[in-house]
Image (cartoon, rainbow, N blue to C red):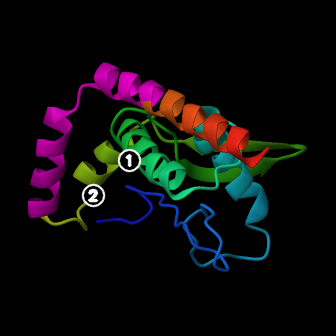
Amino acid sequence: MEAASLSTTRCTATAGGKESPLPAGGLSKKNDGRHIEQKNWSIVRQTVGYGRFETQRECDLLNMIYDYVRLINNFFIPSQKLISKQRDGGRIVRKLDRPKTPYQRVLESENIELKSKDLLSKVYATINPAEVRREIVRLVQELYKIKDEHEKTQR
């Protein structure tokens, strides 16, 4: 499967012996920060906000939330890919392909095995987007409830 098409994010709860959720790391480039921050805002921050989550239970809930968010983003939210970019005098003309979801791009790809495509099609057939969004809201509410309880015990 294409790693860029169907992404997942996990947090781990150990950093220097202290429980702390961390975003999944990977190979990075010197100037990746602006792209990563854009994704953090558009996906992570819009879903769970800017709270500091420190316990293993919060980390587990974040992982469950990310699993549901991954389904929504990969199966139902289309994006456009840049096809070409040309300078025309003082302006830049960009050509974009038609919007497609990562799921649609995987199905259209010739580099993906038919077995993987069939598996994704079965997953897609079982997803109810409204139900997934309700579950995300429920988990985020539970996450902040646990966070508030944790902050009360720390005072």
| Quarter of the image that includes the N terminus | bottom left
51 is within the stretch colored magenta: no
Residue 109, label in figure: 2
- Residue at image point 51% right, 54% down: 59
Q: Residues within 10 Å of mark 2 (few under 14, many from 20)?
A: few
- Residue at image point 12% right, 53% down: 119
- Mark 1: which amino acid? Asp
Q: Which residue is mark 1?
A: 67
For residue 2, above or below residue 68:
below
Q: Is residue 69 left or right of residue 140?
A: left
Closest to the observer, 131 or 139 = 139
Q: Is residue 83 left or right of residue 116?
A: right
Q: Is residue 68 left or right of residue 125?
A: right
- Residue at image point 71% right, 48% down: 52
For residue 136, above or below residue 30:
above
The stretch in magenta equals 114-138
Closest to the observer, 138 or 70 = 138
